[in-house]
Amino acid sequence: MHAPRARFLLLLAAAALFLAAVSTALAGASPVDARIANVIAELEQTHGIRQTALSPDGQTIAWVADADMGTEIRIASTADASHSRRLTAGTGAACEEDYPAWSPDSKSLAFTSNCNALPGATDQADIYLSAPAAPASPARRLTHLHGGVTSLAFSPDGLHIACLYIEGATRSAGALAPMKPPAGVIGVEGLEIQRVAVVETASGEFRQTTPATLHVYEYDWAPDSRQLAYVAAPPPGENNWWVAQLYTQGLASDKGRSVLAPDHTPGPLHGLQIAVPRWSPDGRQIAFIGGLMSDQGATGGDIYLVPASGGEAKNITPHADKTAVWIDWRKPGTGLPGGTACCQHPLLLVSWSQSGQVVIGELDTTDGKLTANYGTIPATVGDGRLEESLSVSANLKVAYIKSSFAAAPEVYLGQLGAAAQPVTHLNDTIKPLWGKPESISWTSDNLPVQGWLLYPAHYDPARKYPLIVSAHGGPSAAVLPRWPDLGYNAIAFSALDYFVLMPNPRGSYGEGEAFTQANRKDFGYGDLRDILAGVDAVSAKFPIDQQRIGLTGWSYGGFMVMFAVTQTQRFHAAVAGAGIANWQSYYGENSIDQWMIPFFGASVYDDPGVYARSSAIDFIHKVKTPTLVVVGDRDGECPAPQSFEFWHALRAQHVPTQLVVYPDEGHHFNSPAHRRDVLERALSWFEQYMPPHS
């Protein structure tokens, strides 16, 4: 380990370089290869689809898609979804409309819109209510807000609409958005607290319901419409999701009641995370997903039940070989056409991640046994609320947005258990420029590991090809087949005739909770062995040039790049996006330090050794691999000084390197120009140091 003074001086030097480099980070970009430009142009043509919502009676479907200078909501009859019309609060001007939510009787659709925002407040959205069966009737404005509003949901009796609301919001909630520049009393002043707010559908009366002392992440209505269940923690919200508790609260109350606190829960849930709270139809219990999670929104684990009045949480899937990522109760009276209505036993619909694919099924909550398997989907699905969430009607029609490596996103509609068909055709003309995908499996340390391999776009088995390995973020996440966004992604490398391997090593979702927890206190060791075993498996089957193997990743994947090049010379070029070079200094720099204790077992102040063991900076003299380093200057998850520290060390040792800092960007880049630039630079870096044609 470095001496404390040496570390301090290194950080001071990095900070000075950071201030000097931000203003000039984007200067001197390399000319763009024509093939790279083609890939970027193809990605730019993709129409994004944000959400879809199926009416409870299954008769009407709504979706939100990108439009010129904004987004728009379209609705259609499920009997003939090829004919849709726009539903809007405005007069046709470009604006943002989002978060559609159906009333329980399927007669009204609530949504957010900034179409009628006042000059000077053009980003301000309000809640509107529309009657889609009467298209001539204008949408009714329910609110006049001053803040951020998301996640609309009707109460079961239809008398209220709940939402997540941040009064006076200056940024999106969560750690992915750019952090505000630090000023004032840190952790005290300038906090933006997300609360559940409720608006009466008749009068439009709007009030914030949950306490101002709690930041709410997710919520659900009780079946009696008089209570809420929610997952919340004291602010700051981007940091404390990892210590959040489950609360219930009466609609007329101003105080929440803690039902479950993982920090004080014995057994396998102790100290872990909870998400996706779902109140049972009889009001007696709340289901949720619990496990080791590293990012809010990318949740996964086992399924638990806890009495709504509080008590012991029961794990009903303790030995699952897959990861639950979304759940919802089957409502009484629902069922497949011609089948038996639900339910002799309380059932949960579940979306699982399993070996790089999505599995949809149904569980009996009395014993956790599978009662129905609605199929496996080699794609990414979701209705826009959560990862792999579905919009399901009373007669078990289902709607979701689906994309894969081979198909750009579209809205799909079908019956559970049957093949869904596309409703939209926004991206029919867009075809992948990259090669075909293949799921591959291998064994590492007696663990089953799965990954996705993309062939070179112009594959010829008689030739040898370079390979780029992409380590995913998280680490609690998984690579599923997904059409890439414009921005940093490894899929584009295949279009330039690289093999691309995207492994799901230990620590990933998809093989059960024990597999997800297998890298605790072991970052960079077991998961790197899994990745290298995957390189060996691919090399044994395909014509890989062993002198042209590269590595890339973002976030935890960026850490894996930084660490891997200190542990092996297997990789001949690398690109580290928003990485972590030094877990010890990182602990005090980031905005989300709470996430680290479940993974490392203690704070850095109580066990610095376990953090040093996985810090790339402590093995930096071993690096020989040319490495490009990229980061946003307002990244709170993986702060820019981490990238400076790594780049500075490589430069001092004359290892080919370059650091690019993107101004006003957080962990997730928003600027289209920056998203193009970072992909161009990464592609050019691999072209320079391990070109596809030797």
Image (cartoon, rainbow, N blue to C red):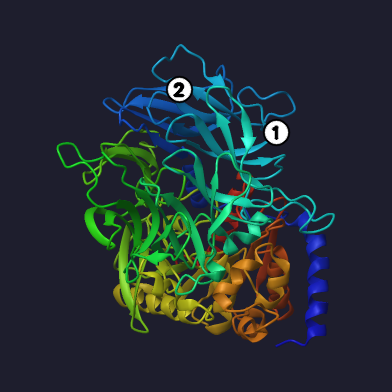
> Left or right: where does residue 278 sit relative to residue 234?
left
Q: Name which residue lies at 56% across and 39% down.
A: 163
Mark 1 neighbour density, 10 Å: few (under 14) some (14–19) many (20 or more): some
Q: For the view shown, which residue lies furthest in the top direction?
A: 136
Looking at the picture, how far across and down is residue 41, in whole percent? Answer: 50, 43
Looking at the picture, how far across and down is residue 306, in whole percent? Answer: 43, 60
Name the foreground residue: 525 vs 686. Answer: 525
- The secondary element bearing badge 1 is classed as loop
User: How many numbered dots are placed on residues in this image?
Assistant: 2
- Amino acid type at circle 1 is His
- Amino acid type at circle 2 is Arg
Q: Is residue 537 above or below residue 285?
A: below
Q: Name which residue lies at 27% across and 53% down.
A: 362
Which residue position is annotated with label 1? 146
Q: Is residue 59 above or below residue 549?
A: above
Classify the position of the N terminus by image quarter: bottom right
Looking at the picture, how far across and down is residue 390, in whole percent? Answer: 37, 45
The quadrant holding residue 463 is: bottom left
Give the spatial CA distance, label 2 vs label 1.
26 Å
Q: Is residue 338 above or below residue 88?
A: below
Tell me, yes or no, if residue 582 can be seen here. no
Name the foreground residue: 184 vs 569. Answer: 184
Which residue position is annotated with label 2? 86
Disc 2 versus disc 1: nearer the observer = 1
Classify the position of the C terminus by image quarter: bottom left
Given contact means CB atoms under 8 Å apart, are the residues at marks 2 and 1 in contact?
A: no
Looking at the picture, how far across and down is residue 282, in whole percent? Answer: 36, 46
> Left or right: where does residue 301 sit relative to residue 31?
left
Mark 2 neighbour density, 10 Å: few (under 14) some (14–19) many (20 or more): some
Q: Name which residue lies at 65% across and 63% down.
A: 592
Q: For the view shown, which residue lies furthest in the left direction?
A: 338
Which of the marked residues, 2 or 1, is nearer the chain's N terminus? 2
